[in-house]
């Protein structure tokens, strides 16, 4: 069984990341500084050894005895010779002087140093003496008349240099953890202060429910990511509030639309059952009830189509010939217009194709044509057209009907919306035709808009992305 552990908070993760990165940086800087200090100390030691070796070389054979030579060097170098010792070798590497009393072990001459000395080159190296103590040694050849006559070796114990490096390493070992710990505490405080607005937003978001979406998250107004997050959350809450309000209004309107025919159907049946009726009267009651049932069926079908189209596009789409589709819709519109005394014609049509569901697109166009014929007075006209430009196809349905106020151009696409007496229930609709048309077009990644003024007709335009030929 897998054990689940509680996840760390953002504040804790930020602190851990900050501390880990800081630790890596400080350790890297400490290692580099330690290396540079070591290199610097060795360079200083080498320079000091070279100074002593040059003095030994310049004194020549003034004193061959080690004691005399060392006494002479002490007079010349003073404290510079305090922690150093030297020896003279013949060209073959054999000692010519005995080691000083303070350093009884002779300095070693490595094969590499002897080879370089034979070529007249200096050699700096670190060697271990008999007591396993590291010594920095300079091997310097004395060349006269083109040949090596003597070899000078100057050494210095690395005890003090190593002690300095050890103290520096101890200091780093103490200061690095202490600095990282203090930085972690500071990082935690900074993260707490920085994330305090996020905590307030979280508390506010927890108080918001579907029943009350009017509350908004307080913006810190700092212009940073948290400010943009609060603004985004407020926009999302505004959209949710609008969507919930539309959903409630839709449910209420749908219930109202369903209740009216049901009430009429119930009333006619109750009246028929109050007494004996003739067959003709029963027939009239049944015919009236059948009309209400048909109206309920149309309304339920419209609601089902609207919910499906609002759910989004279908996963599979076919290429639709919009010109052929427009001709089919024109045939339907011509029959509707003949009954209503309205002329329906095609203004112009170009060849264009789009990807989508031909049945749904036909329903959207038929709804627009039915709406145009329904609200156009007898003797008016409805014109259809199809154009293609800029990667999109435009299908327009223009009429000479009652028109629409510019302020109501968006409201007429809401379900169950009737803006005036002309758009009443007496026309036979439930106010779903335009809503269904727009939801179908939007599901096909298109747009549906309307232009018009009261008394001067309306112009509905569908824009759909073209499919390349």
Image (cartoon, helix red, strand yellow):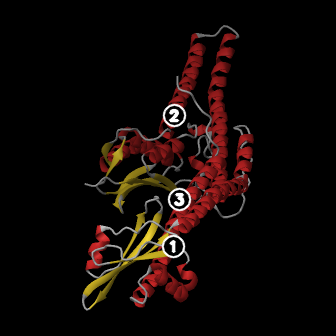
Label at residue 302: 2
When the figure is inspected, residue 39 is found, relative to residue 4, above or below; the finding is below
Picture coordinates of residue 6, whole percent (x, y): 62, 35
Question: Tag 3, which secondary structure?
Answer: strand
- Name the one closer to the observer, 461 or 294: 461
Residue at image x 40%, y 76%? 97
Say whether residue 396 is left or right of residue 25. Answer: left
Residue at image x 41%, y 50%? 344
Picture coordinates of residue 157, whole percent (x, y): 50, 68
Q: Nearer the viewer, mark 1 or mark 2?
A: 1
When the figure is inspected, residue 372 is found, relative to residue 288, above or below; the finding is below
**Lower position in the chain sequence, tag 3 or tag 2:** 2
Asked if residue 61 can be seen in this view, the reply is yes
Asked if residue 419 can be seen in this view, the reply is no
* Mark 1 touches mark 2? (CB < 8 Å): no
From mark 3 to mark 1, how far is it between C-alphas?
87 Å
When the figure is inspected, residue 343 is found, relative to residue 433, above or below; the finding is below
Give the labeled residue for mark 3: 451
Give the labeled residue for mark 1: 41
Q: Residues within 10 Å of mark 1 (few under 14, many from 20)?
A: some
Locate residue 255: give its quadrant.
Answer: top right
- Name the one closer to the observer, 408 or 58: 58
């Amino acid at each position: 069984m897998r054990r689940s552990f509680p996840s760390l908070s953002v504040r804790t993760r930020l602190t851990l990341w900050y501390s880990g990165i800081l630790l890596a940086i400080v350790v890297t800087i400490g290692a580099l500084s330690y290396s540079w200090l070591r290199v610097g100390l060795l360079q200083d030691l080498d320079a000091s050894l070279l100074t002593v070796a040059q003095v030994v070389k310049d004194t020549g054979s003034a004193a061959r005895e080690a004691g005399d030579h060392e006494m002479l060097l002490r007079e010349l170098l003073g404290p510079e010779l305090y922690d150093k010792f030297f020896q003279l070798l013949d060209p073959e590497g054999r000692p010519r002087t005995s080691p000083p009393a303070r350093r009884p072990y002779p300095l070693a001459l490595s094969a590499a140093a002897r080879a370089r000395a034979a070529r007249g080159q200096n050699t700096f190296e670190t060697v271990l003496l008999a007591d396993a103590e590291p010594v920095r040694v300079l091997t310097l050849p004395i060349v006269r008349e083109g040949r090596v006559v003597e070899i000078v070796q100057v050494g210095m114990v690395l005890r003090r240099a190593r002690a300095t490096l050890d103290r520096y390493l101890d200091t780093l070992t103490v200061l690095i953890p202490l600095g990282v710990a203090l930085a972690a505490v500071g990082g935690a405080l900074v993260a707490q202060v920085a994330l305090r607005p996020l905590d307030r937003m979280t508390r506010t978001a927890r108080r918001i429910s579907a029943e009350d979406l009017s509350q908004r998250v307080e913006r810190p107004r700092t212009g940073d990511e948290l400010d943009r997050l609060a603004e985004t959350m407020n926009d999302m809450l505004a959209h949710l509030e609008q969507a919930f309000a539309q959903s409630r209004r839709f449910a209420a309107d749908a219930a109202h639309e369903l209740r009216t025919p049901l009430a009429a159907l119930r009333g006619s049946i109750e009246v028929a059952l109050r007494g004996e009726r003739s067959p003709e009267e029963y027939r009239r009651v049944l015919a009236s009830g059948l009309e209400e049932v048909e109206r309920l069926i149309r309304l339920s079908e419209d609601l089902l189509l609207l919910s499906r189209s609002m759910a989004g596009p279908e996963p599979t789409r076919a290429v639709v010939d919009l010109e052929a589709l427009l001709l089919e819709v024109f045939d339907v519109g011509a029959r509707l217009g003949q009954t209503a005394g309205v002329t329906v014609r095609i203004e112009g049509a170009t060849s264009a194709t789009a990807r989508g569901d031909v049945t749904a697109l036909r329903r959207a166009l038929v709804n627009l044509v039915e709406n145009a014929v329904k609200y156009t007075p007898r003797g008016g006209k409805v014109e259809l057209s199809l154009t293609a430009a800029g990667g999109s196809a435009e299908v327009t349905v223009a009429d000479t009907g009652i028109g629409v106020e510019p302020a109501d151009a968006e409201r007429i696409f809401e379900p169950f919306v009737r803006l005036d007496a002309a758009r009443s229930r007496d026309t036979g609709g439930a106010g779903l035709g335009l809503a269904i048309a727009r939801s179908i077009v939007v599901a096909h990644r298109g747009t549906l808009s309307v232009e018009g003024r009261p008394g001067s007709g309306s112009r509905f335009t569908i824009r759909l992305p073209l499919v390349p030929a």
